[in-house]
Image: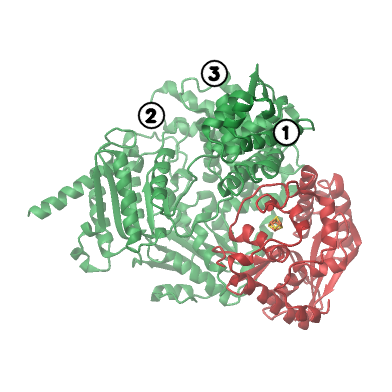
Chain colours: A green, B red
Amino acid sequence: MSALKLSTDQIHLIESSPDEKIFLEGIAGVGKTTAGVERLLFLLAQGIPADSILLLTPQRTLAKPYIDALLIPGVSAGGQVSVVTMGGLARRMIDLFWPVIGGQVGFSHPDSPPIFLTLESAQYYMAQVTAPLLQQGLFESLVIDHNRLYSQIIDNLNKAAVVGFPHAEIAERLKNAWNGEPGQMHIYDDAQECANRFRTFCLEHNLLDFSLQMEIFTRHLWNLTQCREYLIRSYQHLLADNIEEDTPIVHDILRQWIPQFRSSLLIFDLDGGYRRFLGADPQSAYSLKELCSTQFEFQDSYISTQPVTALENSLSTILKPQETAIKTLNPSIERYHPKTALVHGYFRFYPEMLDWVAKQVKQLIQDGMPPGEIVILAPYLSDALRFSILQRLDNLNIPCVSHRPSRSLREEPVTQCLLTLAYLAHPQWGKSFQVTKFDMAYALMQAIAGMDLIRAQLLAGIVFHNRQGNLQLTSFSIINPKMQERITLRLGEKYESLRIWLETYQQEPPQELDHFISRLFGEVLSQPGFGFHSNIKSGEITANLIESIQKFRWAAGEYLSETGKSIGMEYLEMVRQGVIAAQYLRSWQPESEDAVLVAPAHTFLMYNRPVEIQFWLDIGSRGWFERLYQPLTHPYVLSRRWLVGKPWTDAEETATNQETLYKLVKGLLRRCRQKIYLGLSVLGEQGYEQQGALLTTFHKLFQQWQSEGEN
Amino acid sequence: MRLPKGFQFSQGSLQDFFDCRRRFFLRYIQQLAWPAVESEPMLENERFTQQGINFHKMIHQHLIGVPADRLSSFAFKDDLENWWQNYLDLYNRLEFAKQTAIYPEITLSSPMGNHRLIAAFDLIFRQRDNTFVIYDWKTNRRRPPRVWLERRLQTRVYPFLLAKAGGFMMDGKPIPPEQIRMVYWFANFPLEPEIFNYDEKTYHADQKYLAHLVETIEHAAEDNFHLTDDARMCQFCVYRSLCERGIQAGIASDEESMENDIITLDDTFLDFDQIAEIPF
Ligand code: SF4
């Protein structure tokens, strides 16, 4: 066991017999995960083979403390603990047992391998299936970006799979709960039609989106003797943390599986359920308690200091006066004034507030606070807000990291440069895209080291020709010498190398787009004198773009070859439409260990790591409690908790919003050791005054403190 | 040199250090994405790699109970059909399934210096006489000579890790090195496997060698991660533009022939006496 100071309860749990079935519950910060990690290490130290242990979490970030613990050299030699999400396990099992199951499930080509879809490729296929229907007038009454429409239909399918109802019932459930204009209900039928067609399309083409993976695993593979026996044979010990954030279908599987394990430890966060919008169901998770012969409840917080706990009490009383303030084992809590846990800056304009935040962070770090102990949170983090904060921190040389890069892949100048050059190199793609002189100038600025905007524009103005869609680059040598001198011969020489490379490429059969970019990167752009040489960021973005194209090619290549479309051109078209490369998926991103984290509040909660200092921004925003506007789906109605047929009323909406805010505030405070910094501004990010419920709550709190002071 | 948090040594990363220290630095310490072409022709190599992956997966599926006749329909094209048939012949000959225990696609790890050493095995099985056989499926177009395999870090790391970390396969007792054998089986040359028997002396030599290698890496200053002297390595390395070591990638078949006669490596960190003692 590690040198951590553990409570008697924790030790008792950790050292329970390796045959014990344990249920552990408690609020955040009471040492549940610490006990889970130590239990894992204890089992290993008892000689339990690591490869017989299954560690299950609802999402990968939540497994981090376990992964970190397993990587230390002190863990004895042996096999490998399987760290999985149920989605990951489902995919792995489908991949292994596909030859047995593919035909039974109804796929048209069970003798060909399955194609697993990412969110991005699922969106692509949904667009293929849905676009013709949109042209026929489906969703006519709905004003919504098409990509959001696709993602909500996918979301509905996912909900059906993880809640465990047939996907054909989506519309019925949504319509039964609809409480607005009856004329609007047809949009649910439209969404159902798209979902049905998408499912049929997937079965015809061996495509497996997340919903189909989960359905196949839970309805078919789990009942297939070979697969179930393989799983039961492989794993004898289960550790499942944050089960409250997992979905009911996962709990159904665990209900059947737990009796087969030699030991199990289920960890339940009493305040959790932050992933409800993804189908989390704390109630069904809690029902697993009855399967466990030993039960523990931890109560002492290891994280929050008394002032933070006092602040939590004060805010909870305002947010939910009907609930008693949280229990604390320290009766002297009254002595600590919550004020000492709160710092706030109040400004008229938003940028002023952001400046203040950056300054405070700087000061904290100067005073010795490690950057990794500071997080900056907002309900939703718009690209503009993320950029503004990261830039300010960067200017002050503060190491910072965001849950996403500051720009989506398609917005990166490096991506735009590569795709412009790709388009130039493939005249066979036709005239579908507009490449302007500006695009060319920006591409040259990226491509050639030392090329400034003025020279790039000059050069593009002379050498780039778009004759009715036929794009052409002419040689630097035919430019008049005075102009050559202005641009400089060095830059001209690099331009000429690039031009000749592209010209030579065109004389050979075209290659796959990802291969083309890889070659362009290695042979030209990353060579000395070019813009990507020794430029780590450019390498990273190019790698991500190549990976995105490659995944697209693997997922859609066969389908596109049936339709006769070029993969490269289709990729470019999808980027233009924002269907792909619009997400922030990056596999090449080294982890920053000690940096200020900038993230949406819910994302931070799913990292499940306490910090010393939290900055809360945008507290006037309704995003702290309101759901995103998603007219085609509904996380509560499509849950197992909702009575099918019951209408969703304003009263439910209000109660849900209140509960969301209450849980979020508590969740954040229980992951804060020292202080909350509130960044307040009269005008919000968009320049309007905001009066959201969290802001009102703080106003009430300040008024209380003021009147206390007056008395 | 501080290695990234969570870094684990593997035969691949150690081989990279062995081949070129700079490559190790760029790939594992800086974790630098540099997506240039590794070797040509790209599309053909990609297909070949994919076939290799499919082949490994099919064996895994077969060994966990998916019937061979269901799998055979997936081995319908290119080399895969041939490889699969060769594997089935081997399977029928050796009867893996009748062994005491089989462990397909298993990962073992062990503490090594301030980090861990990890290896993913294609197959380990325990025979009735308590001897253990490691099988590594190779899909090389050409059969590498024994001397080349002997020099690969994999040949040291795999049996060493099994002896070190495989005790749970032997009812909790350590596996004596004498009871370990490593077999490289070539799908294109099914009757020419390369077999390496392991023993106590080699185990101790490997332990010392690997510990020394890891320690060297852990304590090397940045300027110790220098560029390889063997510029041929650079033809098959994605970082060649960064190191200013050329423009185009080498041709894959050349890579194999080049690898086959690597002799002038920078191995100043090795304990030559130690190597001489190892009875391969
Ligand atoms: S290009 Fe050559 S020197 Fe540079 S990392 Fe690769 S092998 Fe080493």
**Quadrant hosting residue A419:** top right
Image position, residue A531 (x, y; %): 60, 42
Choose between B276 and A498: the one closer to the eye.
Answer: A498
What crowding class fits label 1: few (fewer than 14 Cα within 10 Å), some (14-19), or many (20 or more)? some
Quarter holding the N terminus of chain B?
bottom right
Q: What residue type is labelled 2?
A: Asn
Q: In this orientation, does residue A1 appear? A: yes
Q: Mark 2 points at which residue?
A: A179
Q: Which chain carries label 3?
A: A
**Quadrant hosting residue A696:** top left
Choose between A362 and A7: the one closer to the eye.
Answer: A362
Image position, residue A187 (x, y; %): 49, 25
**Mark 1 or 2, which is nearer the eye?**
1
Residues at marks 1 and 2, CA–CA distance in whole angstroms: 64 Å
N-term-proximal mark, 2 vs 3 = 3
Q: Mark 1 points at which residue?
A: A500
> In the shown orientation, is residue A678 left or right of residue A370?
left
Image position, residue A498 (x, y; %): 68, 35
Q: Do discs 1 and 2 share a chain? A: yes
Q: Which chain carries label 2?
A: A
Q: Is residue A634 above or below residue A71?
A: above
Residues marked 1 and 3 touching at CB (< 8 Å): no
Residues at marks 1 and 3, CA–CA distance in whole angstroms: 48 Å
Q: In this orientation, does residue A197 appear? A: no
Secondary structure state at the residue bearing disc 2: loop
Instruction: Point out which mark residue A137 bears.
Output: 3
